[in-house]
Amino acid sequence: MNSKIACRAIGKTYGEGELAETVLRGVDLQVNGGEACILLGPSGSGKTTLLSIIGCLSTPSSGTLELMGKPVDFSRNDECVRIRRHALGFVFQQAQLLPFLTAQQNVILTAENTGLSTTAAEQRCAELFRQLDIDKMAHKKPGLLSGGQRQRVAISRALIHKPAIVLADEPTAALDWRHGQAVIDLLIEQTRDVGAALVVVCHDQRLVPRFDRVFTVDNGRVIESI
């Protein structure tokens, strides 16, 4: 599976004229399949903006993005939707589960939107829930789950279709240290198993040793720690 991410001179500016604010400045970043990378940096440094561009949720003002060896045409909304649906998996700061559906239903709904059959989705969901130790929670609604359990459901939802690229924006922010470590370890383990590229935005320096590569975003530029 080609899971490569390649950002080339990516820039992002909001507004025009005197009100213009440049958030990213000529960012070059490459992540290969099977690599787990962390983006560090202060609030407002551009971490989430860069993640949004890689996730085809935001259009860069300059530069190019290549995903899986092909340039992304941001002018084509249908292409961006297709990439998000089939090639990307997202884990957000909050689990963002539908409260009226069970844990299993939340995951299977996303799977079916990617084109998986119900049978295949149910089998894959059961497998992930076993691996993430939440199989006994499959038929419970989010309100009956702990924060860590909800985030594990969210990870299952992100991985259900075996995406080439997984993006996580502050996935541990709402969790205590113990559950935060567990969530990061599970994300890394699950993405490595399928050879996916993992990019995590995080503020917690204590998690750095778990990642293959470490990037710092500051004043709109990205620097890799050696």
Image (cartoon, helix red, strand yellow):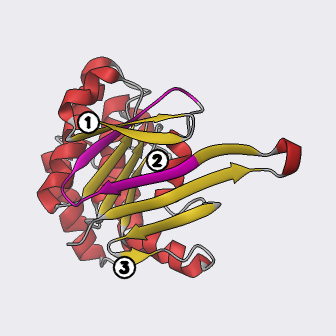
10 Å crowding of disc 2: few (<14), some (14-19), many (20+): many
Nearer the viewer's eye, disc 1 or disc 3? 1
Q: Amino acid at mark 3?
A: Gly
Q: Residue at x 58, y 46 (%)?
A: 24
Q: Secondary structure at mark 2?
A: loop
Q: Residue at x 42, y 26 (%)?
A: 203
Image position of 79 with respect to 175: above or below: below
Residue 63 left/right relative to 131: right
**Location of residue 18 in the rendering, given as x and y in whole percent from the top left corner:** 87, 43
* Residue 97, label in figure: 2
Residue 178 left/right relative to 145: left
Task: List the residue tagged with mark 1.
Answer: 184
10 Å crowding of disc 1: few (<14), some (14-19), many (20+): some
Task: List the residue tagged with mark 3.
Answer: 115
- Judging depth in this view, the residue of 139 and 108 nearest the camera is 108
**Location of residue 58 in the rendering, given as x and y in whole percent from the top left corner:** 60, 59
Q: Secondary structure at mark 1?
A: helix
Q: Bounds of the magenta span? A: 25-43
